Image (spheres, helix red, strand yellow):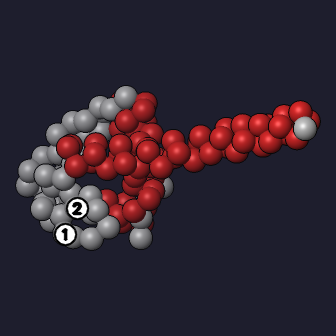
Amino acid sequence: MLRFALSAALVVLAATLGSAPAAADRGRPALGASIAKANCSRCHAIGRTGASANPKAPPFRYLARRYPLSNLEEALGEGIVVGHEGPEMPQFRFDAKQVEALLAYLASIQR
């Protein structure tokens, strides 16, 4: 009986540990979405549908068509600066957790 209880406890522990990263992965895109909404939605379409408010600002769901999303990691962390015709894009600098979350969100909406 004790062996069964110990085995069952180990199975539950392994399942819990195995699901922790999955739960964290689900949280990162949500944080990334909130970062995009707060900082980017004034010009960019940040969701799976819709047009960008600034026609020169590409919808986020198509960014991977232009270049690998991983190329944005350094730019987002060090301060991304891009000139557009019309309103200029403000400079943004995100910490490592924000960059990871924003990239996870962007990856989740690509078409």
Residue at the location (84% across, 34% down)? 6
Residue at 35%, 64% (x, y): give it: 61
Q: Is residue 73 visible?
A: no
> How much space separates mark 1 and mark 2, taking CA atoms?
5 Å
Residue sitting at 28 percent across and 43 percent down?
35
- Whole-percent x, y for residue 89 in the image: 17, 45
Dot placed on the residue nearer the N-terminal end, 1 or 2: 2
Is residue 90 shown to the viewer in this render? yes
Give the residue displayed 33% in from the left and 32% down from the top. 94
Picture coordinates of residue 100 (x, y %)? 45, 40
Residue 3 vs residue 100, the one in the foreground: 3
Q: Quadrant of residue 8?
A: top right
Rendered view: 49 above or below 63: below
Q: Which residue is situated farthest in the left direction here?
A: 86
Amino acid of disc 2: Ala
Residue 79 horizontal side relative to residue 14, left or right: left
The quarter of the image holding the C terminus is: bottom left
Task: Tell me the quarter of the image containing the N terminus.
Answer: top right
For the view shown, which residue lies furthest in the front direction? 1
Which one is nearer the viewer's eye here, 22 or 8? 8
| In the image: residue 25, left or right of residue 13 | left
Q: Secondary structure at mark 1?
A: loop
Q: Amino acid at mark 1?
A: Ala
Residues at badges 1 and 2 in contact (C-beta under 8 Å)? yes
For label 1, the residue is 51
- Pointer 2: what residue? 45
